[in-house]
Image (tube, grey):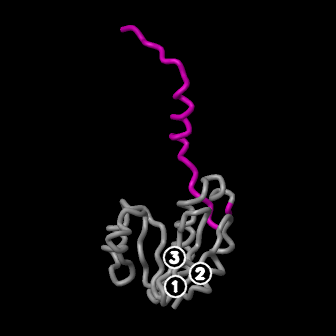
Amino acid sequence: MITIQEVRKFAMTLPRTTEGLVGGRVKFYVGRIVYVSFSHDGTVMGFGFPKEERDWLVGGTPDKFMLPSASDMRYHWVLVRMAAIDEKEMRELVLDAWRMVVPRRVALAYDEVPMPRPSPGLRAGRALRGARRVRLSD
């Protein structure tokens, strides 16, 4: 089972991360935004996750992931049972949650797992935005 100490050891390597204790619960922040939080007993970890994808995540592995409480459904948040994940998965969840709250350039500078680059087609499309349009006659 993954422990809070193992999460702390990894989370504190991420730029701009700070740790806090609120109401007896350990939380990790970037600025004032929480991206990881633990239950009082440390058996459940909440983490930032896109709202539009959480039903897919929870529905796919309900023995591992849970939806947050009704009052927290407005946030980009999901819960995971600590006993159900290994270190590799914990690192992925924490890193992805952290990437949601830091500026893109900070995330790109962190080199544990490089973020994907935009496809060449997207870059070409951006370059064409400023191009003049020429109307061809028939």
Q: Could you tell which of marks 3 and 2 lies nearer the N-terminus?
A: 2
Residue 3 drawn at (x, y percent): 56, 88
- Residue placed at 48% from the left, 67% from the top? 48
**Where are the magenta residues, as a range?**
110-138
- Residue placed at 67% from the left, 64% from the top? 16
Q: Which mark is residue 86?
A: 1
| Distance in Å between CA atoms under marks 3 and 2 | 10 Å
| Distance in Å between CA atoms under marks 1 and 2 | 11 Å
**From the viewer's perspective, is 48 left or right of 104?**
left
Q: Quadrant of residue 33?
A: bottom right
Magenta stretch holds residue 35: no
- Amino acid type at image mark 1: Asp
Residue 86 drawn at (x, y percent): 52, 85
Q: Could you tell which of marks 1 and 2 lies nearer the N-terminus?
A: 2
Mark 1 or mark 2, which is nearer to you?
2
Q: Which mark is residue 37?
A: 3
- Amino acid type at image mark 3: Ser
* Disc 1 secondary structure class: loop
Mark 3 or mark 2, which is nearer to you?
3
- Residue that mark 2 sits on: 7
| Vertical order, 9 against 134 (above or below) | below
- Amino acid type at image mark 2: Val
Outermost residue to the front: 23
- Residue placed at 37% from the left, 73% from the top? 68
> Main structural element of the magenta stretch: helix, strand or loop?
loop
